[in-house]
Amino acid sequence: MKLKSTAKIVVAGLSVLALSACISNTPEKSDNVGGTSNAEAGSNDEKGDTVVIGFSAPAADHGWMGAISEQAKAAGDSYEDVDLRLAEGTNDVNLQISQVETFINDKVDAIVLLPFDGAAMTPVALKAMQAGIPVINVDREFNDANAARVTVLGDNYGMGVSAGEYVCEQADGNENAIVAEIAGIDSLPLTQDRSQGFKDALAECGLDVDNRVAADFTVEGGEKAAGNLLQAAPKIDFLWNHDDDQGVGVLAAINNAGRDEFTMVGGAGSANAMREIESGDSVLKATVIYPSTQAADGIKLARLLVQDKAMSDLVEVTVPRTIQLDAPVVTEENVDEFLPTAFES
Amino acid sequence: MSDTPTDAVTQEDTARVEKEAARQVEPGRFGQVMRSGAGHNLGLVLALALLALVGVATGGERFASVDNVMTILRFAAVIGVVSIGMTFVITGGGIDLSVGALVALSSVWCTTVATQTMANDIHWIFIVTTALLVGAGAGLVNGLLIAYGGVVPFIATLAMMASARGLAEIISARKTQIVSVPGFTDAFSRDILGISVLVWIFVVVAVIGWVLLNRTTFGRRTLAIGGNPEASRLAGINVRRHTVLLYVLVGLCCGIAAVMLIARTTTGSATHGQLYELEAIAAVVIGGTLLSGGRGTIVGTVFGVLIFATLTNVFVINNLSISAQAFTKGLIIIAAVLLQKRFSRQPGS
């Protein structure tokens, strides 16, 4: 794959953890059970002290968020030594705070928290940290660095960059190519980051966004926005749609209009988008991943942290403070690799 | 409440109609018990005790600890204050679907940069006053639309629900506003006698609500209007003015809840208070207040709120799957309302 982005500040992708899972069979460390000594490289998945992890996330009101909880649960279930406590998904910060308070009362060993609102959950996260419970902050950041021991983030800017670089590569020097963009909810910082990354990457090869509309992450909104865009732009060469959930509607509008003259790139990486890519006969040729495995990684990191282990592929002997996940491009060539961890929208 | 001249003339009639209206909807046989409040509250006490038993049986120390009880109470406090206000509106024969949006609007309005700057210059109490005024003001709009505009409560407050949240988004530009006024969070994160200030606020609001509903003319009129607005009007109660006051009251409660939520999160946000209307209505109805008006109970509402808060807590402690939690919650609401209906023998309703 030649699509490596240079602009990324990725400390480690999920592949690091996946790899460490594959090579974890050093039997001589089995006397380590019950102890909390630093495990040797490769022994990270060996059974250790039981780790009680509390997990709380917003309501699963769209495919990506549903996948977040599901994958977190699967990650917890995959370890004998993880006791995962799940709280009901909620968009009410009052309830989410009380869930975290319950975890604190329970004296869980670690809390993995995808806040509905990062700033609103900061006080209770600080409370947990002060009570000696490490908090792993996923996706939406707290506004106080002391409120989390580890932060796992996606890369919104990187998504835009990946999409832009893919378009540049496909345009192959054609500076007259017409590029369109269908954004998500325009007022969100994450949407602005994605668009900025897209713009910056396009500028590298002399392209810019000719037509831009915004939708709202829903199928209905995607259909409406795409319908308007296709009316406004009679000929398009490349189209980037920020989100595969709304992409279902975008594709419907494209089919209704009978347009197929352009190459479309998706975002987030849903399973049905990947199946479209796999089929080869859709205008959707690629999508950019925004990992729905972030919380699952949070669970794995919480376990490592509590068992006093480290990420064994790194030299550092403790778990890093911040982990920003990669935003790779999925195309027909590598879709097999990503389809198994993709989320159903 | 000062009486209008009309009231003075027919004060005796008024009192009679109020009592009649309140009595009309009481079930005959349990009438006296119900009036004392003990009757329908007994079922709630049993339900809460049962929940607590399940909690102790499954969670043991983890459930029965002081820390956990405090967690339940702090969670219940915010929605509890909204529910007390909701009890009055529903007792008075109305409904307010805009409470969640009013919490959001109040929380956003009182945490803007401008308000915080003023609060820094004057006192953090400025934030609280702003929140209360915004809540009460929006409630006033609801009340005027309903009482004088003739818009049915469901529609008027539905419109407010959309507009208030929209306005909150406009004011905040959909950003989370962090409160950095010194003193504000300190004042509300304090404990008094080992109990969080937030819980004390709920207690105070509930006690005032109880006195207001059960021991004042205002309360009797609320019951009368809810039971039979036409008879109340004929008896000389200013039904329109009273209706407006009810919506101002629930709006004020939303303002208080907004302050509590800001204290808990250090933020004001247009996303605060989501689905509070449903939670408050559920708590009020489970508590035994008639959705059609004419009968209301503050004690019942407090129990309704506590039952939901405890339920949520027992779920988390027992680590039920996320979908199972939502499913079970729905079942328990239905079961509680059916039992309640049977217990209080509401004919035909």
Image (cartoon, rainbow, N blue to C red):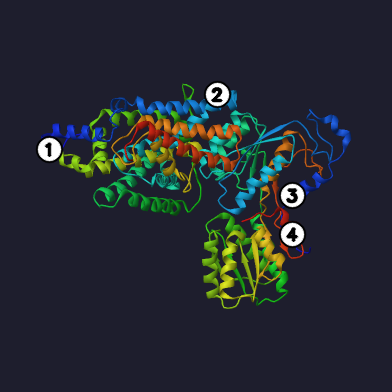
* Circle 3 residue: A14
Disc ID at residue B120: none
Q: Residues within 10 Å of mark 1 (few under 14, many from 20)?
A: few
Three-letter amino acid code of the residue under disc 2: Ala
The chain that hosts pointer 3 is A
Residue at (37% x, 42% y) in the render: B130
Residue at 54 percent of width and 37 percent of height: A97
Say which element carries label 2.
Answer: helix
| Chain-order first, disc 3 or disc 4 | 4
Q: Amino acid at mark 3?
A: Leu
Task: Tell me the SS state at disc 4.
Answer: loop
Tell me whether circle 4 and circle 1 mark residues in contact (CB < 8 Å). Answer: no
Q: Say which of marks 2 and 1 sits in front.
A: 2
Q: Is residue B83 above or below residue A203?
A: above
Give how far apart the Cα atoms at labels 3 and 4 are.
Answer: 18 Å
The residue under label 4 is A6
Which quadrant of the figure has residue B217?
top left
- Circles 2 and 1: CB distance less than 8 Å? no
Q: Are marks 2 and 3 on the same chain?
A: no
Query: For this rendering, which residue is in front, B290 or A165?
Result: B290
Q: Nearer the viewer, residue B118 or A134?
A: A134
Q: CA distance from mark 3 to mark 1?
A: 77 Å
The image position of residue A138, as x and y in percent, is 64, 45
Residue B231 occupies quadrant: top left
Q: Which residue has dot 2 on it?
A: B64
